[in-house]
Amino acid sequence: MSSQTLLELKNVNKVFGENHVLKNIHLTIERGKFITFLGPSGCGKTTLLRSIAGFYTIDEGEIRMDGRVVNDLPPYKRGTPMVFQEYALFPHMTVFDNVAYGLDIQKRPEAEVLQRVKAALDKVKLTGLEERYPHQMSGGQQQRVAMARAIVMNSPIILLDEPLSNLDAKLREEVRVELRNIQMELGLTVIYVTHDQLEALSMSDQIVVFNKGAIDQCGTPHEIYYKPRTAYVADFIGTTNFLDAVVLSADNGTACVSFGHSDQTLTLPTTETLAPGEQVKLCIRPESLRMNQPDAGQFIMNGQVVSSMFQGEKERYFLQAEDGKEWIVDAYDIGEISYRGQVELRAMADKIHLIKLT
Ligand SMILES: Nc1ncnc2c1ncn2[C@@H]1O[C@H](COP(=O)(O)OP(=O)(O)O)[C@@H](O)[C@H]1O
Ligand SMILES: [Mg+2]
């Protein structure tokens, strides 16, 4: 274990009755990072967070905090406070009392409470607002109060379970920035749970993608978006066009593949170990495809525009290829141009990502 490691999960399994909710979870979390658990509803994110916090006992495996096994410790001895939806601030209490709450429960001396609450509010830049009530503050400020409440406990890690899910879109974006700023300024270790891929991409140092209680991939937002390890990850994060292909040859970080009945071949960069004859999937993002641009890459496909949808910064096109397959293409900043009828699609080989089938 490196000194940077704060939390280590080894082979964590959790079962509810017949329902195997967490399956062989292995994960290492480093100090000072913003980690996001991402996945659709019901895939086990909250269960893992509650297991880390000590609200659930796991059935198999090990949870280590700072090198120490904490499996059998109750929540209040783990130092992992959770922040829930809408921050769960007490509406009838002032900011000061909200932040002091955890220390009051522990019956800390009054002078200590005063000093620690002051320091926590100072850290999140809310000094002077101690006597306000939550409803007198903006969403961003409420988020800061929620963070101060966790910071005041001197906890090594803060767990956030979809805290922004009930806010409207604009406020959510503002609070997201706020939260990430506090985390970076103070070097906090945060685990953040969401089902929103955009939220995950925009805030995280590392994203952990859950698929039915197991981890499909753990990586930086760029790795998850551009180098998804499974079709599930590629499909869940953003929009992707998939294409079946066969490996002809592979060596030295590239693979030559063939696809389609036109027997096209392409040489692509890849880090996977592949054998000739192996079936793979190619994935091409809608923004990586160009229409009717002869110099836009070695990958070529012909299609018919079926419909399109204006989305402000881009126009999204739905096309049908000769084999009947649907393609999605995003065209940016094209002004008055619109594509109709038969078009030629192209993409650069280095924008095509190869996925090994398991
Ligand atoms: N306390 C519980 N008792 C029984 N089943 C539960 C309990 N909590 C969660 N589950 C089940 O575990 C699965 C994962 O739930 P959860 O961790 O809440 O998913 P997520 O947070 O990703 O939406 C679901 O099938 C859910 O019904
Ligand atoms: Mg949940």
Image (cartoon, helix red, strand yellow):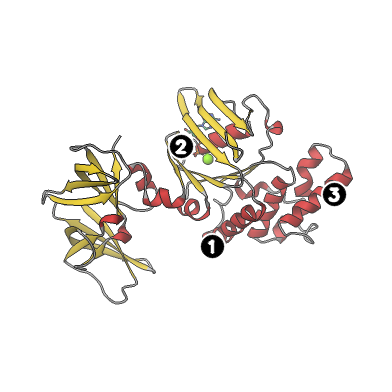
User: Which residue: 35% across, 67% down?
Assistant: 314
If you read the primary sequence from the N terminus, does the residue marked by circle 2 or circle 1 appear first? 2
**Where does label 2 land, which residue?**
43
Label for residue 170? 1
Outermost residue on the front side: it is 252
Question: What kind of element bears circle 3?
Answer: helix
User: Which residue: 22% across, 69% down?
Assistant: 339
If you read the primary sequence from the N terminus, does the residue marked by circle 3 or circle 2 appear first? 2
Question: What kind of element bears circle 2?
Answer: loop
Give the foreground label among 3 and 1: 3
Q: Position of residue 76 (x, y in %)?
A: 71, 33
**Where does label 3 land, which residue?**
114
Q: Position of residue 90 (x, y in %)?
A: 72, 48
Question: What kind of element bears circle 1?
Answer: helix
Observer-nearest of 81 and 166: 81
| Disc 3 and disc 2 in contact, CB within 8 angstroms | no
| Left or right, residue 291 beside residue 316 | left
Q: CA distance from mark 3 to mark 2?
A: 41 Å
